[in-house]
Image (tube, helix red, strand yellow):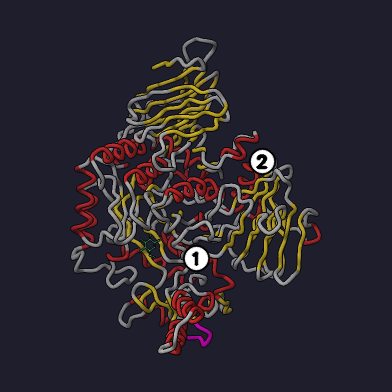
Amino acid sequence: MIKIEFGNSFVTDAVVDINYVKVVPQTQLPEFIAVNQGENFSISYGMKKKDIVFGLGENVGGMNKRGGIYESFCFDEFNHTPDKKSLYAAHNLIIVDGERKFGLFIDHPGKVRFDVGFTDIDTLEISMENPNFNLYIITGNSLKEIVKKFRKAIGISYIPPKWAFGFQQSRWSYPDMTSITEIADKFRNSQIPCDTIYMDIDYMDNYKNFTIDKAKFPEFSEFVKFIKNKGFRLIPIIDAGCKKEKGYDISDEGIENGYYCLDKDGKPFVGAVWPGHVYFPDFMNSKVRTWFGDKYKILIDQGIEGFWNDMNEPAIFYSEGGIKKAFEKIKSMEGKNIGVDLYFQMKDTMEGISHSIEDYKSFYHNVDGELINHYDLHNLYGYNMTRAAGESFVKNYPDKRILLFSRASYVGMHRYGGIWTGDNKSWWEHLLLNIKMMPSINMLGFLYSGADVGGFGCDASAELVIRWTQFGVFTPLLRNHTTLGTRAQEPFAFDVESTDIFRSAINLRYALIPYIYSEFMKAAKESECYFKSLAYEFSDDISRRVEDQVLVGDSVMLAPIYTPNTFSRNVWMPEDMLLWKVGDYTDFNYSLHPKGHHFIDIELDEIPLFIRKNKILVIGNHSHNIDSIDQSEITVIAYVQDLATYRLYNDDGVTTNYMNGDYTELDITIKIQEDSKPQVLTNLSENSIIKKINYLIVNSKGQLFKL
Ligand code: MIG
């Protein structure tokens, strides 16, 4: 990977391992990349007809980004419609996969625009308002190799505790002890596994970060224990903005120490979010990160073990200055005959007060004594909020894994936490968007990620939540979440039959933990992806164009259903495959299919799971939560033509001891010669937690061997 510096770029700390980077002068820019110094600074590449363009992480559009314009500008975008150009993240990695294969990472904290053959069908043009940036060029023989090189340079992905791979339930909000307890009991009574319950903004005292509303939770730490005894962990939300209020320690301390962002006059910048007026911590300042990060301890001391960081683009409903101007404008219209022009002006004035560029340009960060305008560093804000928490966890609790994920992100934040994909809607289109986004997000190292299952905005039908959950079974972060005032969408919120289907799907998730966790951990350690597009592993022309199937780890392919009233679909099998339509996971049924196009029936209660040729899937048992799973028995499910091997990784799931070699690797080898019985070999040791291994091995003739 080579690095070329343009102008004087801000140090983002996205790339951390310089061993993988060679700095070269601009004169060594490869001849296929052109630099254009127009009104906006841009670089461009002439795409070939067959080039596929992957990347951009969390954004709209497909896996192949060709034909669209995308912008990196972290934004509180609650309407993920196809006309949008950005969501909450700035993931400036783009990979051209054609005869020439290379990746470009534009390390730049301001707005970056990617025109991927929209304006001119064959031109990839990347432009910036500000010409100070570092360009990284990554070459390799395959998409996989390019991603791996890039990932090595940006550092190892965040590792959550194992219980964070359980099913998680959220809504805005379960506001108090009664509602949370009720949800916990409903999970247990309906015998649906679940590990966590989320606390959205209403748990706080007047939306003040790190406080608890005493009326709703008189004895908070007792309540945390009470819920934990039922087998659940509580996960509170933390917002970026801190309430401006004399006497609130976080407000006061921040002001006394100059920890908040400043306006042009050097006074603390005041915006508004939930509690009305707020200050924004200056996360670009390392002292502020330490200060804010250590505040999480207040909740950790009360028994909390995980957090989600929200509104950190940052979202600003309005600023003091912005709303003043808006009122003046509206007042000036009062009494006038409001026709088309004024009508739209009035509407735009009110809508324009939120997340306005003018506001983003009106405050400053103190970076080592130098004041830098927020707009120029905008995309680093959420990243550094999550970094604040992540760094403080490592410092204060070096042995413990704490769950952490964020809404906004930039490249490099994957070292500190995961991401969820923000405010989607209960639309089928957003289930498909989720499927397409997962491989892209993984390329950036955000392995611990997922969408709001069932959709955040709007009311959801049982069928949508079922199909979404059936895909979510495979996303590391599996959380059902919805907004204020929508129809209940927990797995027990619909009819009895739906509840049964949810139970089977979620039971499968828990049974799959050995595989999911093993593949996740190996992906993190080896700078690999957990979710992959087919193009990642297969180079045939059809695999390269498939947009609605994904690979999960090394052994599994998915072809989810993502449209209503749909009970069959086309599936491209890039090689011979075994299909297991999973209803009840204890019932192994299967069919073999040769490489090619297939039209497959899939009932509402079935999850189609494809096992690749000469690959192995390992499952265990479900339980009501991760901690209580009996790990002594596993079942190896394999489709073997001649030879299959698998390495099952495991560790204690809660400490960081795995970093010092405290983990286990079970090697499984299965050999089949002609029609004979499979030969099985493992390195299982006597002191292993696993005491019994069952085998379900299918050979190329479709014969099943149960050993
Ligand atoms: O804009 O805290 O994306 O998950 O429920 C609303 C309330 C603010 C946005 C988050 C969403 C959360 C909600 N928050």
> Where does residue 430 sit, x and y in percent of width and height?
45, 51
Closest to the observer, 109 or 655: 109
Does any portion of residue 570 appear in the rendered image? yes
Three-letter amino acid code of the residue under disc 1: Phe
- Residue visible at 33% across and 75% down? 275
- Residue visible at 72% across and 61% down? 43
The label on residue 625 is none
Magenta stretch: give its range.
263-268
- Residue visible at 52% across and 28% down? 598
> Where does residue 482 sit, x and y in percent of width and height?
34, 56
Crowding near the residue tagged with mark 2, few <14, some 14–19, many ≥20 C-alpha atoms within 10 Å:
some
Three-letter amino acid code of the residue under disc 2: Ser
Return the residue at label 2: 142
Magenta stretch: residue 85 in it?
no
Closest to the observer, 662 or 374: 374
The label on residue 75 is 1
Closest to the observer, 387 or 124: 124
Question: In terms of secondary structure, where does tag 1 sit?
Answer: loop
Q: Quadrant of residue 696?
A: top left
Question: In terms of secondary structure, where does tag 2 sit?
Answer: loop
